[in-house]
Image: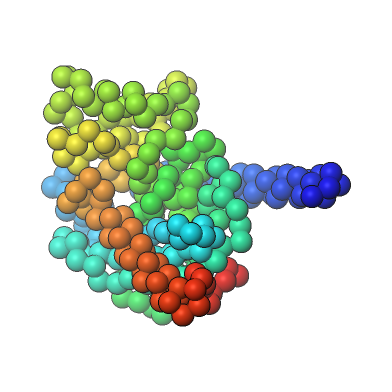
Amino acid sequence: MDSEGASSESSSSGDQLEKWIEEQDQLKKKLIAYDDFTWKLSSSMELSHGSEILKYVGGVDMSFCKEDSSVACACLVVLELPSLRVVHHDFSLLRLHVPYVPGFLAFREAPVLLQILQKMRDDKHPFYPQVLMVDGNGILHPRGFGLACHLGVLAHLPTIGVGKNLHHVDGLNQSEVRRSLQLKENEHEQVITLVGNSGFTWGVGLRPTLSSLKPIYVSVGHRISLDSAVKIVKMTCKYRVPEPIRQVDMRSRAYLQEHQTESFKRTGTVTTDQTEP
């Protein structure tokens, strides 16, 4: 590529980033970081408000082809409480054309995840999730507005960010959190509050079992408080990762692998017949 072409591409990328920053800042103004739903959390861990109970918890994730990272499978699952039985799943196999840019993952993944949610809503599906767990972060994010926030605001849905790794935000450090959980005074603690150098509480490090040395990182997405988010995550944990996230991860990987294999057998290459709108 000549210098003029390189300069043009760099300018285009810069313009796109500026647009993303502006859009992210506008969406962030709509963020609700308190409980904004009709059911309530009681001290007995049962979620109810009058005759209304929390019954359907969703999970969303995307898996990517190892041979071609632009080929992806988006997945939504819905689990029923308290059994944690999967009552609904849906998939979208597609080729992404938006690059991954750190801090702006939502602009790559949110559009197709929103499509799957909207399809379920349009179909007036009885299992539409009352709260959604996102395999990604909420406010525990370099710009304070991760994928879980982005999805929640655009879908107007209570969302919880569940990260497997900790972003370096406001002085927070993953190795320090893990070391803290190993200290004798914390040996019976499941939750470590993630307070940054600024004094702001970004989320929690949570280990569902005390024997686990690797916590997950829970943060507010939208329309839910941190306390409620942590209670719901605890309710849905059989293993280290809450069941909605574990199921959506396994199912999206399996679906992608199955269709990759079929495509390769037919054509000798990995292809997909769906493209991002």
Quadrant where the C terminus sits is bottom right
Residue occupying image coordinates x 15% and y 35%: 210
Viewer can see residue 152: yes
Residue 178 quadrant? top left
What percent of the width, then of the height, locates residue 146? 49, 45
Residue at the farthest right position? 4
User: In the image shown, does 3 or 177 lie closer to the viewer?
Assistant: 3
Left or right for 163, reference 107: left
Query: Above or below — where is 79 with respect to 37?
Result: below
Camera sees residue 121: no
Considering only vertical position in the picture, is 207 above or below 95?
above
Q: Residue at x 32, y 35 (%)?
A: 204
Q: Residue at x 13, y 47 (%)?
A: 44
> Which residue corresponds to the image point at 45% horizontal and 60% vertical from the top-left?
65
Q: Position of residue 141 (x, y in %)?
A: 48, 38
| Image side of residue 101 versus residue 258, left or right | right
Colour setup of the view: rainbow
Where residue 229 appears, as percent x and y from the top left, is 31, 46
- Nearest the viewer among 239 and 152 is 239
